[in-house]
Image (spheres, coloured by chain):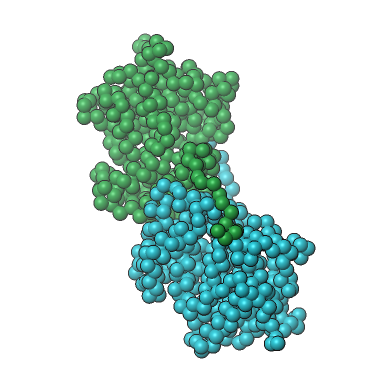
Chain colours: A green, B cyan
Amino acid sequence: MQNKVNVLLIGCGGIGTIAALNLQRGGQATVTAVLRSNYEHVKAHGFSIKSIDHGEVEGFKPSILRNTIPNITTESLPPYDYIVVTTKNYADIPPSVAELIHPAVTPGHTRILLLQNGLNIHKPLRAAFPTNILLSGVSFCGSHQVAPGRIIHEDDDELYIGAFRNPALAAEVEDAAAQEFVRIYGAGGNCQPQFQPDVAFSRWRKLLYNACLNPICAITDLDTGRIQLAEGAVAELVRPAMREIQAAASACAGVELPDETLEKMITLDPVTMYNPPSMQVDVRSGRFTEFENLVGEAVREGRANGVSMPTLTVLYGILKAMQWRTKERRGLVTVPAAEDHTVKK
Amino acid sequence: MQNKVNVLLIGCGGIGTIAALNLQRGGQATVTAVLRSNYEHVKAHGFSIKSIDHGEVEGFKPSILRNTIPNITTESLPPYDYIVVTTKNYADIPPSVAELIHPAVTPGHTRILLLQNGLNIHKPLRAAFPTNILLSGVSFCGSHQVAPGRIIHEDDDELYIGAFRNPALAAEVEDAAAQEFVRIYGAGGNCQPQFQPDVAFSRWRKLLYNACLNPICAITDLDTGRIQLAEGAVAELVRPAMREIQAAASACAGVELPDETLEKMITLDPVTMYNPPSMQVDVRSGRFTEFENLVGEAVREGRANGVSMPTLTVLYGILKAMQWRTKERRGLVTVPAAEDHTVKK
């Protein structure tokens, strides 16, 4: 029997936990998971999972649980074959993903899978790790951590894996790494990821959800069910935004997204699921949003390629102002003291 | 000594209370004020006012306090010379202003002053009261009710009065009514309203604030101070929205708003006042917003006159979705029951 693949999973929320479960159940990987806020709970009780793919799972634990990023040098650890990053990716809030994972990466060996949303997220990683294969994971999973260690998984796990192209590496080797990951993830039998070598297609397609529905739900505080019910919201906000992504995908990457894909994405979450997408959950929780990678990059790419992006430009401006608000609430920016203006100066 | 003018004031919040104070202090008007949520408090204690124009005023009461709209017929009341409406004006939430004030209006006699924001608000009133003079009041007042009966007034009372033109009435008579109101309001000496016969100018100019700053603050939950501080918010949201109003004002009404007026409006509220404009206060309080009159009418008028309104269109769509959310929270719309989607059907 061959050695198991050594996987480091960073971030174990809704998506990360389902990934850990699939990898572990397939028996071909050892999973070291880095947890943050839910570490103590999961160490004591494991995960409690209610999943459309896996049924009810009580007490699940990855092979190794940690609450720090491993430092393979100072801890003398064997190299990780894969690092799977499922944390949020904030382009504007340090630390960057590259800074975060740096101590765990073996140059030239570790494959880094970004199971994260947005456009151009590989660029800082390629600069930091020019000899490592970078993989793209695009997930439609509908999995949420509703309390520490408690996962509700309502949408079929639909996962697209491919390689971000690095001109310095051989495309066949990159694709082989992506395919290996597909195999070890799918070995558990409950989810079969798809190898999709056209990463641009996967990522632009997912932007239909993530640059459109996600921010519109976050800004209006209507979940994906209610946004379908609210009069005019799809016609006046969601569909115009999606048409801009459709045009930008074509102009920027030659990716053609047919109208039916837009319509399918609008109804991806059934109304009665009342699913608040990630950005809405972030805003409700007073957390930062990934607006730069989800909306900002799309707007910049589109405009640079001559595409008019009026709807997304406004959504982007609003999200940027909301991020500033979160920064102020967290003490990262300060404002001048209030003055009494009821008396004439 | 001539008889006092008989004024009915409907709505006694931040703007209404300052209006009552000016009218009453001038000595030329008897003010009957209709209060709602603050009625019991004001009946017992009067208003407590801290004002940049009037200083500190304790225990102020209009001549007559009521908590219902007078019915001049069933109550056998003398006719009102003026009805001053300072309530919110929701085009999409009944009752309409016309329905509300109907029992207090004497056809052909009562002048109805809409001291309210937005475009085309006179149209339903003209249909309901075709023989009454309709007046427009546009106020930059910066006055807020911070607790029942407690008014903080931080911006100089700047009030523009004019007549909404009714082709069935003589313009001189309409203008004379506006000028009379200016006189009785200004007689107190603390605020001199301006007679501004070009109502379209006053209203489009105020839309620079009310269709732009107001919704942007409401949506981002940043007040007018913070919106000036947040990186990019003025350049990417406020100024583009104002340019659309500028273009629409010109195309729809021949109103030319110079660039300096836009810049002045951006800084109208000093940063350190941290003033949450009305719509932001409404959203924070879970109340409806006047988005149809402030943004919707501007978008419709602009578009009908061939003006591209991309920013305001998105703001309008978002506000409309937020209004739906408020309707749902208040039980005015209902949604299908949630279903469990963790189990495959």
Judge left or right: residue B178 versus residue B188: left
Residue B192 x %, y %:
56, 74
Point out the residue furthest to the front here.
A345
Residue B172 x %, y %:
51, 88
Q: Residue at x 47, y 72 (%)?
A: B202
The residue lying toward the viewer, choosing from B24 and A220, is B24
Asked if residue B130 shows in the view, the reply is no
Residue A134 appears in which quarter of the rendering? top left
Residue B311 x %, y %:
40, 58
| Number of callouts | 0
Quadrant location, the N terminus of chain B: bottom right
Q: Residue at x 69, y 63 (%)?
A: B57
Residue B144 appears in which quarter of the rendering? bottom right
Judge left or right: residue A140 versus residue A131: right
Residue B275 against residue B180 in the figure, above or below: above
Asked if residue A37 shows in the view, the reply is yes
Residue A83 appears in which quarter of the rendering? top left
Residue B24 x %, y %:
68, 74
Residue B121 against residue A147 in the figure, above or below: below
Q: Residue at x 43, y 18 (%)?
A: A70
Residue A237 against residue A59 in the figure, above or below: below
Q: Residue at x 52, y 38 (%)?
A: A330
